[in-house]
Amino acid sequence: MQPYVPRPVSNQKPYVIAHRGISAKAPENTLAAFQKAAQTDGIDMIELDVRLSKDNEVIVLHDRTLQRTTTGNGPARSYTYKELQEFDAGSWFHPSFSSERIPSLGQVFETVGKKVWINVEIKSDIFHREPPGVLETAVLDIVREYEMTERVLISSFDHDIVYRIKQMEPRCITGVLYNLYVDFFHLPSTLALRAKADAFICAKHELRSWMLNDAHKYGLAVYVYTLDSVHQAVTLARRGVDGILSNRADDIVKAVKES
């Protein structure tokens, strides 16, 4: 598989990125959702969220707590990885997914890392922050172990994390996620360059033409989430965004690549 570059070359269409896997058709952030994405022609990347278990295993889970997407309860950080494996991470979506468990980042790399690029979003909870460097070190250890350094995009709403990742591993491509309430007065280029990042990522309702122009002026990639309709995806592709995140990446990919 080719090394990941943050912006498609000029004659290519935007990257299509499966948001938490094909999360409209399989439980989010599970191997089932990631495998559906990896098996779909034209999907370039999957996006996933990581945090730590009690024993510092890098796990793939969006929420700080377990109850929305598993049969567990309370903070994931309160359980060891072995304990987390006791919880069903799929039945909430559909009983046919009852065998799904919270995967580790290493499991995901092993399962689909040679088929698609992977956007690793590092979660940073405002009231439950990890000490600086703890999450970053754990993530980079796994990235290096599976030789994924040139096939990942590491992103976060916490731009200090993004900066530390780049300091610790300059070869990693990184991206800053835009928080409308915190970053409103700042240009995309200011936010990204301050964190030494390569990409600017925002929600579809946040993107403005001046933001796209500013980012591209400084050579930054612009990715937009979450676009689940073909019409929205094609519209953003024609506006010149570099990546489109979708819960229905398999439904939009053909139209985006032909736009």
Image (cartoon, rainbow, N blue to C red):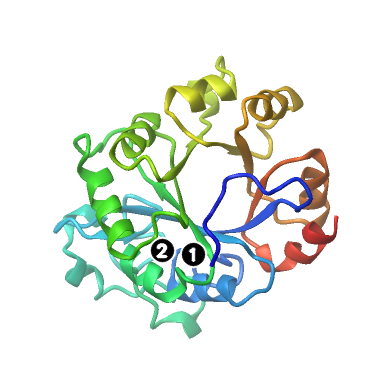
At x 73% / y 67%, what residue is drawn? 251
Q: Quadrant of residue 123?
A: top left
Badge 2 marks a residue whose secondary structure is loop
Q: How many marks?
A: 2
Left/right placement of residue 47 relative to residue 187 reads left
Query: Which residue has dot 1 on it?
Result: 28
Badge 1 marks a residue whose secondary structure is loop
Left/right placement of residue 74 relative to residue 227 reads left
Query: Which residue has dot 2 on it?
Result: 69
Eyeballing the image, is 4 above or below 82? Answer: above
Eyeballing the image, is 22 above or below 98? Answer: above
Measured in 3D between alpha carbons, the distance from the residue under mark 2 to the one under mark 1, in whole angstroms, is: 8 Å
Tell me if residue 78 can be seen. yes
Residue most extreme to the left = 55
Tell me if residue 66 can be seen. no
Eyeballing the image, is 78 above or below 159? Answer: below
